Amino acid sequence: MKIVFVSFFILLAVSVLRIDGKESSKGLTCKQEIDLVKPCLDYLTKKTDAPSTSCCDGLKKIIDSSPTKKEKEAACKCLKKAASEIPNLCKERANNLCKECKIKVDNFIPNDLDCEK
């Protein structure tokens, strides 16, 4: 099964996003997920050479909080929307974020991923 994380698109976390606050995954709202990946923004927009510890910790928390398919879908949709609103997001870095953070997952989320699969 594909693990949906923006590669996160990581995702990340746009402060300009308008989030509805609905629960996205186990115990986390979409806004909380975005807040958890905000520390990744500098890395994903090429302002730093490596993701920060807080970026990787946030990503791990989202993954750990999304054990079921339904929760993975919700997290995927949330983070994919956030990523789409970051104009200078480096897709290559987003696709490699889990690897850079040394987080093992089944799949990284490409921009065209259908979150419901």
Image (cartoon, grey):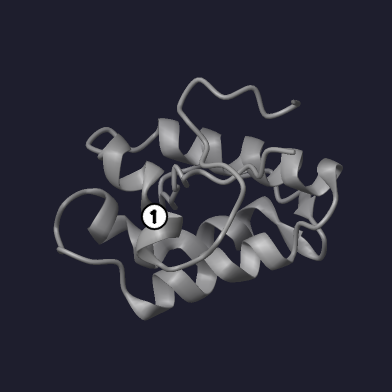
Task: Specify whether 32 is left or right of 38.
Answer: right
Q: Nearer the viewer, residue 84 or 104?
A: 104
- Residue at the image point whose x is 85% and y is 50% from the top: 68
Q: Residue 115 location in percent, x, y?
A: 68, 29
Q: Quadrant of residue 116?
A: top right
Which quadrant would the C terminus be assigned to in this image?
Answer: top right
- Residue at the image point whose x is 44% and y is 42% from the top: 9
Q: As drawn, which residue projects farthest toward the bottom? A: 53
Near mark 1 (Cα within 10 A), the count class, few <14, some 14-19 or many ≥20, is many
- Residue at the image point whose x is 50% and y is 20% from the top: 112
Task: Specify whether 92 is left or right of 71.
Answer: left
Which kind of residue does numbered mark 1 sit on?
Leu
| Element at label 1 | helix
Q: Residue 69 location in percent, x, y?
A: 83, 43
Residue position marked by numbered label 1 in the rendering: 97
Question: Count the marks: how many?
Answer: 1
Q: Residue 78 location in percent, x, y?
A: 62, 41
Query: Is residue 8 shown above or below 116?
Result: below
Q: Quadrant of residue 41?
A: bottom left
Which quadrant would the N terminus be assigned to in this image?
Answer: top right
- Residue at the image point whose x is 49% and y is 40% from the top: 82
Query: Is residue 34 shown above or below 106?
Result: below
Q: Nearer the viewer, residue 17 or 76?
A: 76
Q: Nearer the viewer, residue 16 or 7?
A: 7
Q: Residue 60 location in percent, x, y?
A: 57, 68
Q: Nearer the viewer, residue 18 or 8?
A: 8
Task: Specify whether 114 is left or right of 109.
Answer: right
